Amino acid sequence: MPHLTTRKHGRRPVSPVRTALLLAALGSTAALTTACSAGPAGVELGDDWEGSKTFALAEVDGLVTVVGINPDRPGAQSLAAVPQQADDDDAVSPHIAQLADGRWVVTVPRKDDKPDRRYVVNRKDHTLDGMAGDERLRRILPGKTLVGEVAGLPDTKAADGAPASSVLVRDPADWSTKRELKVPGTIGFAASDPSSDTVCLGSGSDTRPRISVANLSDGKVTPVAVPDGLDVKALACRAGHPVIAGSDPSGKSGRVKVSVTAGADATTVSVNGGRVDAVRATGSSIVVAAAKGKDTELVEVDATSGKELHRARVKDLAASLNITPTSAGWLVYTENTVTRVNLTTGETKQFDLPGTLQGS
């Protein structure tokens, strides 16, 4: 998962500089050929609900839309417009997440410390259904049976009086609050795995954040040591086990090299020769997106041994905002495009988003 942030990002630079954002062109583009209809404010809405395997948020002509992404065809369409209201906080990015039960939830921040507005994506009726919300600036971290809601800024204090961020533990059946947890500092990294009710969180500076695991079931928050010298840039959560990824400052190899150190409390992924933009842990492997020059390399390694399993290069893509696995391949997101990557064959296929990425 990418950095946790509540501030709406500007245009993503295509230089080697990595900015902390929540959330490049390849050859040809592909678009879905299904019919579109005019939606609010003239935004064209598609109808490929069945083919959409995953969802994202994009701003199209000033309006935030739920975008369905079909990695099989491949293509992306705006499928539903997020209701726009006068108290929307335009300085804060909306958020979308998939719960363990398959539901997709959209969160829209509001001004003046008002609670976020929330919607469930109704795939059957092709609508967004409103749901109750009583908290502000929360990012949803889906667990196996519970959901963690992470504050975007420090909103409480630790036992020693230092600033801390709260994590609300929710029951996704009725969205009732079960408990509240406290994590030191500002949470800058957050990741979860729907196979576990333990989430992984990181706070502190970019160069030396404090990593913690939070058990949503019993409320226990446990700190995890961060290796000295690792410039931490991304965090994944493999069945409640932190995967800490960063660039190795000791040298720059000619080829992107990914090294893994598996520990009892956390797994460390060190990348030499490239800048880490994203990391995901799925099953028994870890996939890293590392930028090198004008290109991005996706490298898959064994989560235990670190042995390289697959590698693919995405040419002319200098920075990625997120990566997502699908049955048709990995999706690499930039501000305006998505690239499907087959790690086995190295084949890549880019297609356009209908607007500017807001959340994925």
Image (cartoon, grey):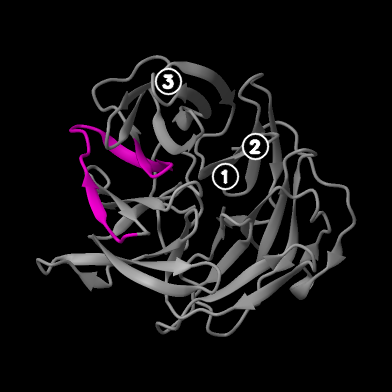
Residue 70 is inside the magenta segment: no
What's the CA distance linking mark 3 and mark 1? Answer: 20 Å
Tag 2: residue type?
Answer: Thr
Name which residue type carries label 3: Val
* Residue at x-position 35% and y-position 16%: 253
Q: Position of residue 258 (x, y in %)?
A: 39, 22
| The stretch drawn in magenta includes residue 228 | yes
The front one of 79 and 141 is 141
Depicted 21 relative to depicted 251: above or below:
below
Q: Disc 3 marks which residue?
A: 256
Start-end of magenta stretch: 218-244
Residue at 32% over, 27% down: 262
Q: Which residue is mark 1?
A: 334
Viewer-closest of 211 and 323: 211
Task: Confirm or deny contact between disc 2 and disc 1 (CB under 8 A).
Answer: yes
Q: Which residue is mark 2?
A: 339
> Up-down: is 290 above or below 143?
above
| Residue at the image point whose x is 34% and y is 70% from the top | 179
* Label whose residue precedes the other's in the sequence (2 or 1): 1
Mark 1 neighbour class, 10 Å CA radius: few under 14, some 14 to 19, many 20 or more: many
Question: Do we see residue 149 in this rendering?
Answer: yes
Which percent across, then down, holds residue 120?
64, 68
Residue lying furthest front in this view?
Answer: 218
Q: Is residue 9 visible?
A: no
Q: Pick the residue in front: 45 or 211.
A: 211
Disc 2 residue crowd, few under 14, some 14–19, many 20+, Cα 10 Å:
many
Position in image of residue 204 (x %, y %): 23, 53
